[in-house]
Image (spheres, helix red, strand yellow):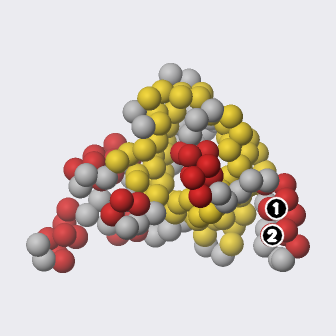
Amino acid sequence: MTQAEQAAVAPLTGDQTAFVQVAVIVDDIDRAVEFLTAVGLGPFEVKTGVHPAARIHGEKKAYEAKLAFSMQGQVQLELIQPLTGDNIYKEQRDAWGPSMHHVQVVVDDLDAAMARFEAMGVEVTTYDRFKAGGGIAFVNTQPLGGILIELKQPRTDPNGPPGYVDD
């Protein structure tokens, strides 16, 4: 297949190839934020991500993670500390310890992007929907020599309720 043919069926094209976030798994968010702030990064917004009904490896599971966000130029740095439940953050921390987890790209149509990755044989390890439309999904390109990619379709209703769906 030529490069042009590959590009025509690529799961990500155009603006969707720009990384908007880099995420790192940490053991202690407060300690990580304190250190990174001391070296000049930040400021950080710290909050808890509550996922009452995420799909993880095809199963519905609830989990929580403590998160810290900071814009570093045009890219957001996300720190992730798994708190409760089984999830891909905990899986990675247990397997490799604190480490880089994923890069995030923004897509127009989450379902279509997931379908294109699945057609390539790439597993969608986790997905979750926002209450206000849109959602996130993680595709596991690690077996192909890559890293996890988080696909994010922004909320379709910017005035809608915050958080993730409950079912």
Task: Report if the CB atoms under discs 2 and 1 are less than 8 Å apart.
Answer: yes
* Residue 17 percent location from the top left of the image: 40, 68
Evaluate whether residue 32 shows in this view. yes
Residue at x 80%, y 62% (from the top left corner): 32
- What's the mark number on residue 36? 2
* Residue 22 percent location from the top left of the image: 58, 65
Name which residue type carries label 1. Val
**How many other residues sit within 10 Å of disc 2, few (<14), some (14-19) or many (≥20)?**
some
Q: Residue furthest left?
A: 1
| Residue where numbered disc 1 is placed | 33
Q: In front: 153, or 102?
A: 102
Q: In front: 63, or 152?
A: 63
Residue at x 40%, y 54% (from the top left corner): 140
Q: Is residue 13 above or below residue 165?
A: below
| Residue 15 figure quarter | bottom left
Task: Please tell me whether mark 2 sits on a helix, a strand or a loop.
Answer: helix
Task: Please tell me whether mark 1 sits on a helix, a strand or a loop.
Answer: helix
* Residue 54 percent location from the top left of the image: 51, 33
Q: In front: 56, or 3?
A: 56
Name which residue type carries label 2. Leu
Q: Is residue 50 above or below residue 148?
A: above
* 3D distance between C-alphas at marks 2 and 1: 5 Å
- What's the mark number on residue 74? none
Q: Is residue 155 above or below residue 107?
A: above
Residue at x 56%, y 46% (from the top left corner): 91
**How many other residues sit within 10 Å of disc 1, few (<14), some (14-19) or many (≥20)?**
many
Residue at x 87%, y 64% (from the top left corner): 34
